[in-house]
């Protein structure tokens, strides 16, 4: 019983997270953050820092579609920031440079 309730809450948390991150809507992302993190000061961050954090979250969220994670990975790389999509980098090893150029541009 307890495990089932935990699984339901976890599944709802993941669904809410994915919905917020896929929306790329600042208000929806902040609403999600307040719901699950309380008043963590996230909404008082500088606009640019906010979007860096969002794109980092998107690269770390394995439940998001691969293309969405790649878009965020590219966004971060183009601005000189690290990402959490190491699984995608590993997946791309051994591809031609033309293949990587296509994969990493949006």
Image (cartoon, helix red, strand yellow):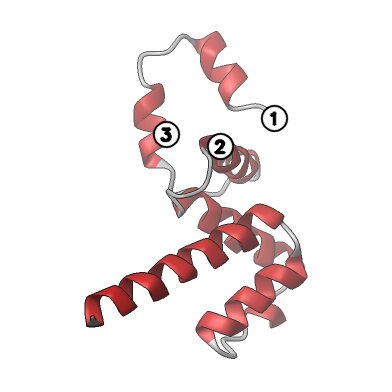
Q: Position of residue 79 (x, y in %)?
A: 65, 45
Q: CA–CA distance between discs 1 and 3? A: 15 Å
Q: Position of residue 94 (x, y in %)?
A: 36, 14
Quarter of the picture containing the C terminus is: top right
* Mark drawn on residue 9: none
Count of number-bearing discs:
3
Identify the mark nearer the N-term, 2 or 3.
2
Q: Name the residue under label 1.
A: 106
Q: Where is residue 50 in the image (x, y as percent from the top left)?
A: 67, 67
Identify the residue shown where x is 52% and y is 83%: 37
Q: Which of 2 and 85 is in front in this view?
A: 2
Which structural element holds mark 1?
Answer: loop
Seen in the picture, residue 54 relative to 104 is either above or below; the reply is below
Which structural element holds mark 3?
Answer: helix
Rendering quarter of residue 72: top right
Q: Which of 61 and 6 is in front in this view?
A: 6
Label 1 crowd bin: few (<14), some (14–19), many (20+), radius 10 Å: few
Identify the residue shown where x is 58% and y is 63%: 53
Left or right relative to 67: residue 84: left
Q: CA–CA distance between discs 2 and 3? A: 8 Å
Rendering quarter of residue 105: top right
Extreme residue in the bottom direction: 39
Q: Name the residue under label 2.
A: 70
* Mark drawn on residue 88: 3
Label 2 with label 1: CB-CB less than 8 Å: yes
């Amino acid at each position: 019983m307890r495990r089932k309730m935990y699984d339901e809450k976890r599944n709802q948390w993941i669904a809410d997270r994915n919905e917020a991150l896929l929306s790329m809507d600042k208000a929806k992302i902040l609403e999600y953050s307040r719901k699950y993190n309380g008043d963590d000061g996230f909404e008082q961050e500088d606009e640019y820092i906010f979007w860096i954090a969002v794109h980092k979250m998107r690269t770390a969220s394995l439940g998001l579609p691969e293309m969405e994670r790649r878009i965020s990975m590219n966004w971060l790389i183009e601005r000189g920031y690290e990402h959490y999509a190491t699984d995608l980098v590993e997946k791309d090893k051994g591809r031609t440079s033309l293949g990587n150029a296509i994969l990493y541009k949006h």
